[in-house]
Amino acid sequence: MNIKHAVVAFAFGFGSLVMANVSAGEVEDRISERLTQAVPGLQVMSVKESEAKGLYEVQSNNGDTIYATEDGQYLMTGDLLKVTDQGIANVTEAARTEARREMMAGFDANGVISFPAENEKAVVSVFTDIDCPYCRKLHDEVPQLNDYGITVNYYAFPRSGPNTASFRKYESVWCADDQQAAMDAAKAGRKVADASCDNPVREQFELGGRVGVTGTPAIVLEDGNMVRGYVPAQRLAEGLGLL
């Protein structure tokens, strides 16, 4: 069940439960427990007070961010915006970015298929699907990105999911003796020899879901910001301040 669809059911199902004299820490635990009970399959990753007084920010395993009142009776989906002297700031997106940066930093990157730049100035993490046309277009520009000093680390995100031909194709690329050559061939539409081994393809696919990947390519920058979709190499380098 999608968490946004479950919010209404949650509100009606638990709206009569009131929390009284609950200390700090217990509030977060109670919100987490109630959400987990209300939404089958949901894993609450964190609950903390938000910038808006009286609202708690809830991060879930599927990348959704919602807000709950202290008593757990009301939930809100959507982005929380803040009026500042400089204009409107997106509080929710800032929280997503920080959470994404932490998740990427905490993941074992030894299993990525890397195309390193000799004069490295920046690193981008690209969640990719071998059969995605725009992923292939981006891959054609990897040498140009490397020339700009950008290392490209590929994370698996076969959009069709586990136990599909595209998923197995990525596993074959990862298990190849020469991963870079196999990736080049697969991205060019050439046949890659079937291969199997212990691999991190499923873990990387699941990581993509947690950091909010909904399509490919998805480019995660070192600060946790995500660029969704294909971006020409020159524009990406400009956005990173390299040109």
Image (tube, rainbow, N blue to C red):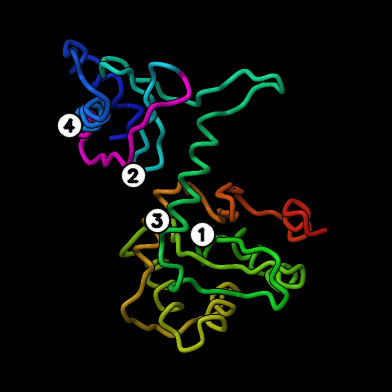
Q: Secondary structure at mark 1?
A: strand
Q: Residue at x 72, y 67 (%)?
A: 145
Residue 17 x %, y %? 16, 14
Q: CA distance from mark 4 to mark 1?
A: 32 Å
Residue 131 x %, y %? 52, 65
Which residue is denoted by mark 2 in the rendering? 61
The amino acid beneath tag 4 is: Gln
Which residue is denoted by mark 3 in the rendering? 207
The amino acid beneath tag 2 is: Asn
Q: CA distance from mark 1 to mark 2?
A: 17 Å
Frontmost residue, 229 versus 224 = 224
Q: Secondary structure at mark 2?
A: loop
Q: CA distance from mark 1 to mark 3?
A: 10 Å
Q: Quadrant of the image for the C terminus? A: bottom right
Q: Using the image, tell me which numbered label, if any, was put on residue 37.
A: 4
Frontmost residue, 91 versus 218 = 91
Q: Examine the structure image and report whether residue 48 is included in the region drawn in magenta.
A: yes
Q: Secondary structure at mark 4?
A: helix
Which residue is denoted by mark 1 in the rendering? 127
